[in-house]
């Protein structure tokens, strides 16, 4: 007990604890000479989890792990060691410590003996060493892994070197190296065996010494091409000491130095001797097979040399061209072809003869001895010599003239079917126009025979006016049909859209389902635009067809066709508005920008995707604008704006007024038409107007008569039909001009597309369209004579 009373250091005795202890930046423990704990620094408290109150007066074994307590050396023993000089200043121990929560960890403990107020105490600096152990373990694992990888790589390298040696010496392909002069510097074992020589007999010698004579002659050129980089592969034939030869197909690579000079040539090749032998065998039998093919083939065959001359031909070919073989031999093949097919045949022969192609297929017209062209499918192939070069050409021909005739008959049948469908529709409209003409003509005849009928003359005049109106409508119908048939020949002219809408509405309404409500809205006054009638009709019909498709499966479908006017804001430009509205399912917003694209369709396999694209192109061509508004579930409205154009002047047409009389004043007219009734009606019309008329039914009759007429007795003007047998109207006028006569001429045509645009029309000529009104014809004659 006395010894304990002598210990001056206790918790709270600040004079016995160094003033710097609490500020020490280490995990430190202050221990008395009897081994009892005095104080902990803040870092030590954090490391161990103990406070000064927990450790005050307790032995330092409190901090030792259980397994180390029995082997602990007392600090007093350490103190004696210091006093005896065993340790000069301090000692570091690796000790397992425990925390307050009983967890354990490795720590390096550095113990130093210090003095405070003359009493010895011990300062133990603690440093956590557990992470060092983990690092050492990781380093050990890493070291083991690296050692294992290095051993594996060493084994692989050894095996790879062994395999490379085996491949280089035992592979089936041949390997060799040469210097730039062609001397061998290395040959593989397979190549040595193929050449039948030892390495000592090969290395250092030039490769040309081992080639067969034909290849020895070209060896220098071969080596030059290799060194210059122009040749990267080639086949060479080598001779063996036993008299045999071996063919090797080489792939070639050059090795260059820093100055880009070739220092070595490397070859890798394979034995193709067997393939070459088979090729020679096939070529030996080629003549036999060709001969057999000639005798047995049902196809017309001909052997042609590389210049295009006929070398041989089988019986079928002779029958095709209608000539015996001896007359064909040496004949240039192209002379048997149609003139238009000869250039393509020559080009094909040239490609085959130069080896650019191995075969060529074409359809050629072979002309027989009688001048008949036979459409033939031909195929020409190359026949090679023993060196594999084109030597001859073999042409096979199959006559498909009958097939082409059947195709034309089928096409004609389809055209006739289409014409029949068109004719049935035209007949319906034309008969509707003829009906009032027939009835009013009958009424006029019956009224003329009723002498006592009131207002007899007024009724007859009214009937004839209606006959003329119906006849003019029939003329306009024919004109529209002809305009429709002029594919790609658009002519822009003023068109009144109210009449167009009314006519199209009738046709559209007839094609719609009966449950669909169709509305037509027209303006009060005429609406004129400048357009092509065919394009305009197609535009409207495409929009109506699009709307009709959108109305399918609708409970109360509605299609509205509207015509109106729209003025541009801030501009004097006036527009005619065409609208097609439906109350269908509408167009999704994401598709609105794409509906004008060609081939884009929402009709799920039914539409071509071209209808709206044609509409867009047509509107642009006519200088207009097109837009669309659509809402899902509410319907779609397409609006087309076309520039309004002024109405053309009204033609002076008064059917009730008598045609002019006595205006001809005895002028002489040569009138020509092959139709008897047309000729009669024109003659009476002109004679009633005071002209002296000489009528002809053909152009040659006119030329015969002109030979009998003088300038004084000849005609003042010629009025002729265009389409006539013998001579057309235009041909007749040209022959008259060649005879020296220059009197004017009028050519009347029912349908001659492009006649007005024909080049070289004679002067003093006017073209008029049938049917021509009497006043128009007489006005034209007067204009030509003045």
Image (cartoon, grey):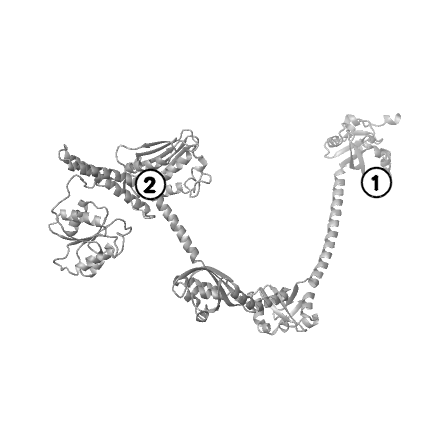
Sort mark 1 into few (<14), some (14-19) or many (20+) by Cα contacts within 10 Å.
some
Circle on res. 87: 1
In-image side of 72 versus 760 (left or right): right
Reading the chain from its start, which is encountered first: label 2 or label 1?
A: 1
Left or right of residue 675, residue 666 in this image: left
Q: Evaluate whether residue 190 shows in this view.
A: yes
Q: Is residue 578 left or right of residue 35?
A: left
**Residue occupying the point 38% across, 43% down:** 614
Q: Secondary structure at mark 2?
A: helix
Q: Quadrant of residue 629?
A: top left
Give how far across and how far down residue 666 sits, in percent: 11, 51
Are discs 2 and 1 less than 8 Å apart at CB? no
Percent coordinates x, y for residue 741 in the rendering: 17, 59
| Residue 58, position as x, y percentages in the image | 82, 28
Q: Foreground residue, 667 or 1?
A: 667
Of helix, strand and loop, which one carries label 1?
A: loop
**Residue displayed at 20% across by 57% down:** 701
Residue to which mark 2 is pinned: 537
589 w.r.t. 303: above or below: above
Quarter of the figure with the N terminus: top right
Which dot, 2 or 1, sits closer to the camera?
2
The label on residue 733 is: none
Q: What's the residue at 74%, 39% (across, down)? A: 131
Q: CA distance from mark 2 to mark 1?
A: 120 Å
């Amino acid at each position: 007990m006395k010894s304990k009373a002598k210990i001056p250091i206790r918790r709270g005795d600040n004079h016995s604890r160094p003033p710097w202890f609490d500020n020490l930046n280490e995990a430190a423990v202050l221990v008395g000479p009897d081994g009892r704990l005095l104080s902990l620094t803040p870092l030590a408290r954090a490391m161990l989890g103990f406070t000064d109150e927990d450790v005050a007066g307790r032995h330092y074994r409190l901090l030792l792990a259980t397994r180390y307590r029995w082997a602990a050396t007392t600090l007093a023993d350490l103190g004696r060691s210091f006093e005896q000089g065993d340790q000069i200043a301090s000692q570091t121990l690796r000790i397992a410590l425990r925390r307050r929560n009983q967890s354990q960890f490795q720590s390096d403990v550095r113990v130093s003996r210090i003095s405070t107020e003359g009493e010895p105490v011990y300062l133990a600096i603690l440093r956590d060493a557990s992470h060092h152990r983990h690092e050492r373990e990781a380093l050990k694992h890493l070291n083991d892994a690296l050692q294992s990888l290095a051993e594996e790589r060493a084994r692989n390298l050894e095996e790879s070197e062994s395999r490379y040696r085996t491949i280089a010496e035992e592979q089936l392909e041949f390997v060799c190296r040469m210097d730039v002069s062609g001397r061998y510097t290395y040959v593989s074992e397979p190549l040595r065996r193929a050449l039948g020589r030892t390495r000592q007999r090969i290395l250092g010698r030039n490769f040309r010494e081992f080639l067969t004579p034909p290849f020895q002659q070209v060896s220098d050129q071969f080596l030059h091409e290799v060194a210059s980089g122009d040749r990267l592969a080639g086949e060479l034939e080598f001779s063996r000491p036993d008299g045999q030869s071996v063919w090797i197909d080489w792939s070639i690579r050059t090795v260059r130095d820093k100055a880009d000079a070739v220092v070595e040539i490397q070859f890798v090749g394979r034995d193709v001797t067997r393939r070459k032998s088979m090729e020679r065998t096939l070529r030996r039998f080629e003549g036999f097979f060709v001969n057999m093919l000639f005798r047995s083939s049902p196809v017309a065959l001909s052997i042609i040399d590389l210049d295009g001359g006929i070398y041989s031909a089988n019986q079928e070919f002779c029958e095709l061209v209608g000539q015996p073989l001896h007359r064909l031999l040496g004949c240039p093949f192209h002379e048997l072809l149609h003139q238009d097919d000869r250039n393509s045949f020559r080009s094909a022969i040239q490609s085959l003869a130069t080896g650019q192609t191995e075969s060529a297929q074409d359809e050629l017209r072979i002309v027989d001895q009688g001048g008949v062209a036979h459409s033939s499918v031909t195929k020409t192939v190359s026949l090679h010599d023993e060196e594999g070069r084109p030597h001859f050409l073999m042409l096979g021909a199959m006559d498909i003239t009958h097939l082409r005739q059947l195709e034309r008959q089928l096409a004609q049948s389809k055209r006739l079917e289409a014409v029949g469908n068109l004719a049935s529709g035209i007949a319906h409209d034309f008969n509707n126009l003829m009906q009032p003409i027939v009835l009013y003509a009958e009424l006029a005849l019956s009224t003329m025979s009723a002498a006592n009928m009131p207002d007899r003359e007024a009724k007859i005049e009214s009937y004839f006016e209606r006959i003329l109106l119906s006849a003019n409508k029939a003329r306009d119908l024919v004109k529209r049909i002809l305009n429709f048939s002029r594919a790609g020949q658009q002519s822009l002219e003023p068109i009144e859209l109210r009449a167009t809408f009314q006519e199209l509405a009738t046709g559209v309404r007839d094609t719609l389902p009966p449950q669909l409500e169709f509305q037509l809205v027209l303006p009060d006054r005429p609406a004129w635009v400048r357009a092509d009638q065919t394009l305009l009709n197609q535009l409207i019909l495409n929009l109506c067809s699009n709307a009709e498709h959108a109305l399918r499966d609708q409970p109360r479908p509605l299609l509205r066709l509207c015509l109106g006017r729209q003025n541009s804001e801030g501009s004097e430009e006036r527009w005619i508005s065409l609208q097609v509205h439906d109350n269908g399912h509408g167009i999704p917003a994401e598709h609105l920008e794409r509906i004008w694209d060609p081939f884009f369709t929402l009709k799920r396999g039914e539409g071509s995707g071209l209808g709206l694209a044609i509409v867009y192109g047509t509107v642009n061509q006519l200088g207009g604008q097109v837009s669309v508004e659509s809402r899902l579930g509410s319907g779609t409205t397409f609006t087309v704006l076309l520039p309004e154009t002024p109405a053309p002047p009204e033609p002076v047409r008064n059917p009730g007024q008598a045609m002019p009389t006595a205006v001809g004043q005895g002028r002489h007219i040569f009138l020509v038409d092959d139709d008897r009734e047309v000729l009669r009606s024109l003659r009476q019309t002109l004679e009633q107007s005071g002209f002296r008329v000489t009528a002809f039914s053909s152009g040659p009759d006119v030329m015969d008569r002109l030979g009998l007429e003088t300038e004084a007795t000849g005609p003042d003007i010629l009025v002729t039909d265009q389409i006539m047998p013998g001579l057309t109207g235009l041909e007749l006028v040209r022959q008259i001009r060649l005879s020296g006569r220059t009197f004017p001429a009028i050519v009347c045509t029912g349908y001659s597309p492009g006649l007005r645009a024909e080049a070289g029309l004679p002067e003093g000529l006017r073209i008029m369209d049938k049917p021509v009104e009497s006043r128009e014809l007489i006005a034209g004659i007067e204009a030509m004579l003045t």
